[in-house]
Amino acid sequence: MTAIAFPIPEQIRELADGAEQFIRAEVMPRHDRHARILEEPRLLFAPDGRFSHEVEELMREVRMAASKAGYFTMSVPRELGGAGFGMLAYFVTWERIAHICGGRYWLLGHQTISHWAFGPSKVLLELTPRARDEVLAGMMSGRTTMCFGMSEPGAGSDAAMIQTKAVKEGDGWRISGRKIWTSNAPHADYCLVLAITDPARAAARKGGISAFFVPTSSPGFKVESVIRVHGSVGGHEGAIVMDNVWVEPHQLIGKLNEGFAIGLLGVSIGRVYNSARALGMARWALETALEYTKHREAFGHPISEYQGVMFPLAESAMELHAAHLMGLNAATLIDAGERAIKELSMAKAYTVEVCLRAIDRAIQAHGAIGLTNELHLVNAWQDVRTINIADGTNEILRRTIAQRLLGGDLEL
């Protein structure tokens, strides 16, 4: 049975099926063997807040196995050595992975496909030949990873307000500044850094920002701290300080002063990914709650017989169905060559909101047990709550939608 009449190509369905098989064969057994480490925060993280060495190795194992199986680089452009699948395949496969992994297996399952900010993607299409030779092999294999340095203490939703500067020196540049909320920074081998190279153009919001590919081992580059969220003892977000970090011409990505577009490209890919991730998590949570309501009894009846329990779940089912269609539509438009700015903004804002609500309703349907670590519903809630902010807050997305409408983009 299916509720989706959307014409998803058979090749993409087979790709998602294969990714599910990979999760069941490589991710779940590996997680189960190491559950003591992966499900105990004091073992999951080292004292400084970074993932422990054992966890880092497990994540690398999954990436490298996924690379060999062809899933890790499935949406990396052919020019970089990937399979070149588009955003529809990306959305469908990520949704399947999140749906299968749920709140328990996501940490390792998340390593199955290269995320644009952590690994190879079309964001790296404009790497120089020398940079490709030096970094691509390791990243394509899953052995090494990157992070994306755009957000700063004073530049979040308004990313054009960045203050990090790259000052010309000889044939290269010296980068100084701070980055914050940089996902994967505590563990990355490289950082894609956005920095001002023409202050006058940057102040006028007419370019002036360039992108550089920087080894995190560079002198002057330091992950100052691990940012902990949701009361966790560790995390994967980092605060970065750069003090006169030297970069050479081959480390420039794309054209000088035109790097901001590279950042926006990554954010757009992230919105497709986050929509799929939230939808898969929410579907898993809803199904978990539905199964529970069939067996849990109160006042002599299964709680599935009570409207107060079931109507909120039915409401979420309607919302998730709409979100699913919105995501498929936006991804298909992008693959057809459309920018789909309004449609992708709608899909991401709507999806993450209704998915958060669905997970919350699933927790409520379980009662107190829904809050326990064993069910992993809280893990899913925290994850989806976070992505109500990531890659464009819901408020910024509404601002974008309104601007498009006022500009005459009235197709709904």
Image: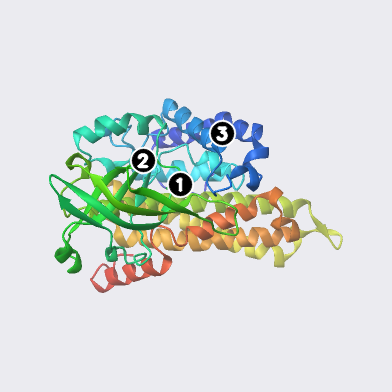
The image shows residue 330 at horizontal and vertical percentages of 35, 54
**Quarter placement of the C terminus:** bottom left
Q: Residue at x 68, y 53 (%)?
A: 290
Q: Which residue is mark 3?
A: 27
The chosen color scheme is rainbow
Q: Give the residue type that dot 1 points to.
A: Pro
Residue 391 visible in rendering: yes
Q: Earlier in the sequence, mark 3 or mark 2?
A: 3
Q: Are marks 3 and 2 in contact (CB under 8 Å)?
A: no
Give me the disc on residue 326: none
Q: What is the crowding at mark 2: few (fewer than 14 residues within 10 Å), some, or many (at least 20)? A: few
The Cα–Cα distance between marks 3 and 2, rounded to whole angstroms, is: 30 Å
Q: What is the crowding at mark 1: few (fewer than 14 residues within 10 Å), some, or many (at least 20)? A: many
Q: Secondary structure at mark 1?
A: loop
Which of discs 3 and 2 lies nearer the camera? The answer is 2
Q: Residue at x 59, y 41 (%)?
A: 105
Q: Earlier in the sequence, mark 1 or mark 3?
A: 3
The image shows residue 292 at horizontal and vertical percentages of 73, 52
Q: Give the residue type that dot 3 points to.
A: Val
Q: Which residue is mark 1?
A: 186
Q: Give the residue type that dot 2 points to.
A: Ser
Q: Earlier in the sequence, mark 1 or mark 2?
A: 1
Which of discs 1 and 2 lies nearer the camera? The answer is 2
Q: Residue at x 41, y 64 (%)?
A: 393
Q: Residue at x 50, y 32 (%)?
A: 62
Q: How many marks?
A: 3
Residue furthest to the top: 68
The Cα–Cα distance between marks 1 and 3, rounded to whole angstroms, is: 23 Å
Q: What is the crowding at mark 3: few (fewer than 14 residues within 10 Å), some, or many (at least 20)? A: many
Q: Which residue is mark 2?
A: 217
Q: Are marks 1 and 3 in contact (CB under 8 Å)?
A: no
Q: Secondary structure at mark 2?
A: loop
